[in-house]
Amino acid sequence: MSDHHATDHRATDHRNADHHVLLPRNELMRQREAKLERLVAMGMHAYPNDFRVSHSTAEAYDFFLAPNHLESFSPLAPGEQAPENARGRHLEAPAMSLAGRVVAINVKGKLAFVRIADRGATDLPGRRACENAMRAEAGMEEREATATTFQLFFSRAADPVRFDALFKSDGEEPPLLDVGDVVGANGRPFRTNTGEPSLRLGTGEAGGPALRILTKSLRPLPDKWTGLGDKETRYRQRYVDLLVHDEVRATFVKRARIISQIRRFFESRGYLEVETPMMHPLVGGAAARPFETWHNALGVPLFLRIAPELYLKRLVVGGLDRVFEINRNFRNEGLSQQHNPEFTMLEFYQAFATYEDLMELVETMFAELAVAICGTTEVPYGEDADGNPRIISLAAPFARVSVWQGIERWSGLQGDAIHDADALRAELAGLGHEPSADWPVGKLQMELFELVAEPRLIQPTFVTQFPVEVSPLSRRNDAEPRLTDRFEVYMGGFEVGNAFSELNDPVDQFERFADQVRNKQGGDGEAMDMDVDYIRALEVGLPPTAGCGIGIDRLVMVLTNTPSIREVILFPLLRPERFGLAAAAGDDAEAHPDADT
């Protein structure tokens, strides 16, 4: 059964004993390791890398979407004469080479049916839906349309020796092929008697075998139907999560498409994508506690980026009037349904624009994203108070409410009371919150707004006119100096974006930085540093500019109907896992599990 490739000459005892201490083996794993060694003994490479794929499973499925391929048919070799066959037409089908991970194996006597999944898995339901539309138009019965796998059909007559080795037990040795293995397959497309699009396996055009193991899976996958139930295990072993949960894989495919669509949106409007530093000498750009590190060669402390804002506005000063960055930010904060210390942001800046211009731009972007990803601006997200599915409308215009209006609408304070520090403190105390004694009125107002208003902002809403005390980088409102020209966009009960007309007065900015420094000296761990170079840039001259930051993770949550940010981040932050001897010794590093989100 040799594949006539270079064999793996590793000794059968090549596995390091330390490996087994760190990752203990169970009986199923030992059986699979024995199968791997049998493959090598039979003259096959343990981990070959010479198989060439001609089609994805989705591309192979396209062959079946021709109107005359809706019925059962058998493939012909090129030039072969088509005999009469009552079961279906004979068609000349192209040779194809597919590769993917084995998801299911069903052996019936001398026939084997193997289902594989590959990069085309996410697109297969769309192909199946297209086929059903064609079948309905032709008056034919529709077929199951949600499967993300493709079928391989292997008859023992095509290669008896390989068939028996892969699928049959001789009483002493089990079959070599297991669910989870990665295989390469050669054959021609055809429909089975039940009409299932399949690849009938046979020797490839270059003489390659019908079916070949490319990677032996030594660790069995969880059951396809029960999957992984434990959330922490899913996040730690995302590679398994993606394999056994179609909906998880689909979510991350959508995430990638959302980011691609965002890029196209801004590039089509004359924005330039840029990259700014991820290690900063100062803390600035947002109110957040940073992660700290140290640069050995320079001998200076550095901070992981909490926001790229100040660098992006430097670029506007430099004449790049429209810039955007899709960036990773790091904030040393806790974990929750909407918070992960490492997250992805979109930030964009436009010269000669106001925050009101950006509200219109955000409305347009959200609506276009919804249509591109979901096919409609009416997007399902979560459930209402009665447990019914909730629909969020991303069609413009969004609702608008100012911070002061929100406090009056949803708290017990009215009129001048919303500007009275004692009244605000009493209202917060009634809600179980004790603000710091040195908080100014604007910060008290914002704290109260977030408590009483934020959970009510389910439909997309622009919250405007923020107090100046909580907006150190925003332009002061001309008519009301206690407020700034700023908005935050909320949906689903949480903030998704933050924007403002930029403060470009260097004197005012210096004074606000000075206030931040005093706050930091007073113990505020989220306050900014004095950025003298940024003041210098403002003195060169920042044009009238508006800027906005959108939390991509939270936006993806809404567009994929996902309740937790950890479900839309491939590898969310977790406590370190302990292996082998450390775990067996009862290491208590896992005694305090991560917050369940």
Image: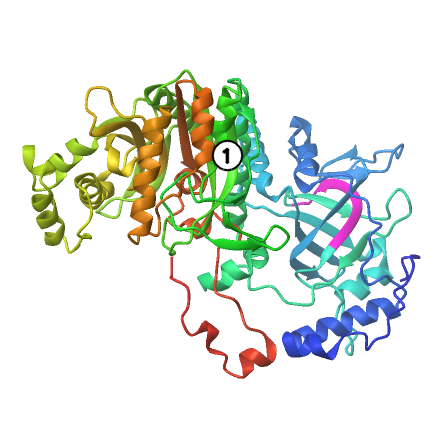
Q: Position of residue 10 (x, y in %)?
A: 86, 70
Q: Position of residue 44 (x, y in %)?
A: 87, 62
Q: Position of residue 525 (x, y in %)?
A: 35, 52
Number of residue marks: 1
Of all residues, the one furthest to the top in this rendering is 352
**Up-down: is 372 above or below 184?**
above
Q: Label 1's element? A: helix
- Amino acid bearing label 1: Ile
Instruction: Report the residue marked by disc 1.
Output: 258
Q: Nearer the viewer, residue 570 or 266?
A: 266
- Rate crowding at label 1 as few (under 14), some (14 to 19) or many (20 or more) other CA atoms within 10 Å: many
Q: Is residue 522 left or right of residue 140?
A: left
What residue is drawn where x is 15% and y is 37%?
407
- Quarter of the figure with the N terminus: bottom right
* Res 277 seen here: yes
Magenta highlight on residue 97: no
Q: Quadrant of residue 163?
A: bottom right
Q: Nearer the viewer, residue 391 or 115?
A: 391
Span highlighted in magenta in the image: 183-193
Q: Quadrant of residue 125?
A: top right
